[in-house]
């Protein structure tokens, strides 16, 4: 099982939204919070171009990323796991599955997320934005996770909360189970190709066998 972290296991999406909104304002950009929310899940190598346009001057990009990182770091102590985050990892482990974290977070952010989860003993492999050339929706991070776990794509299911997770998994033929805990609707996740959608990790845990069966059935029907 490949798991995204922000919005999938940890309740952090809207903290990222506020941090980016403030960072943009510091540099004279008035970007609506709703647009920022829809971009969360991309790494910082993608989100600035997505929200500000690729034709912009990039001289402030490093400052914007640094501002976001500093503002978001102020929230680290307030991060909380989403309902059932540890339980779903335990459920996967009890079924003989490996748990792999696959996130566009930077390494410092990932360390804060891991501390919040407190589930190191249940996690087999971790990949972050620092391990790949491009972040989601590029499949780079997913491909790194596959190599490190030693598993083929047809033996893996991705769990994520954003359309970027669904797209990244789809690029390498991995079915994606969506969670609505990051604020994206079930309908939108399904429209982008999610095999099934659950409310949060606890909901997934309570329907884990059903979810896995559905995901692999979808994968087999779309070789």
Image (spheres, grey):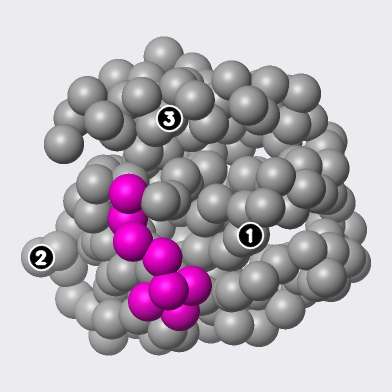
Residue tagged 1: 99
SS assignment for the magenta stretch, majority? helix
* Res 191 quadrant in image: top left
Residue tagged 3: 215
Which residue: 43% across, 30% down? 215
Q: Earlier in the sequence, mark 2 or mark 3?
A: 2
Q: Nearer the viewer, residue 154 or 60?
A: 154
Q: Earlier in the sequence, mark 3 or mark 1?
A: 1
Q: Earlier in the sequence, mark 2 or mark 1?
A: 2
Secondary structure found at label 1 = loop
Q: Is residue 155 left or right of residue 172?
A: right
Secondary structure found at label 3 = helix
Q: Nearer the viewer, mark 2 or mark 3?
A: 3
Outermost residue toward the top in this view: 187
Report the disc number at residue 16: none
Q: Nearer the viewer, mark 2 or mark 1?
A: 1
Residue tagged 2: 55
Q: Is residue 103 left or right of residue 187?
A: right
The location of residue 36, given as percent across then percent down, is: 45, 46
In the rendered structure, which segment of residues is drawn in magenta?
A: 147-154
Q: Residues within 10 Å of mark 3 (few under 14, many from 20)?
A: many
The location of residue 77, given as percent across then percent down, is: 89, 67
């Amino acid at each position: 099982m490949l798991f995204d972290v922000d919005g999938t296991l940890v309740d952090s999406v809207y903290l990222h939204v506020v941090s980016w909104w403030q960072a943009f304002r510091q540099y004279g950009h008035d970007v609506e919070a709703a647009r920022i929310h829809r971009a969360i899940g991309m790494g910082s190598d993608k989100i600035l171009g997505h929200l500000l346009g690729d034709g912009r001057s990039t001289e402030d990009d490093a400052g914007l990323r640094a501002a976001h990182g500093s503002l978001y770091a102020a929230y680290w102590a307030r991060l909380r796991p989403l309902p059932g985050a540890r339980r779903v990892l335990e459920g996967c482990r009890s079924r003989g599955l490996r748990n792999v974290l696959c996130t566009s977070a930077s390494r410092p952010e990932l360390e804060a997320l891991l501390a919040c989860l407190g589930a190191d003993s249940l996690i087999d492999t971790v990949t972050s934005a620092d391990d790949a050339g491009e972040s989601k929706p590029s499949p780079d991070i997913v491909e790194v996770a596959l190599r490190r776990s030693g598993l083929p794509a047809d033996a893996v299911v991705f769990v994520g909360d954003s359309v970027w997770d669904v797209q990244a998994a789809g690029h390498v033929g991995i079915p994606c189970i969506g969670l609505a805990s990051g604020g994206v609707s079930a309908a939108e996740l399904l429209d982008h190709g999610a095999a099934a959608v659950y409310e949060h990790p606890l909901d997934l845990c309570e329907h884990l066998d059903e979810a896995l069966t559905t995901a692999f059935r979808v994968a087999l029907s779309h070789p």
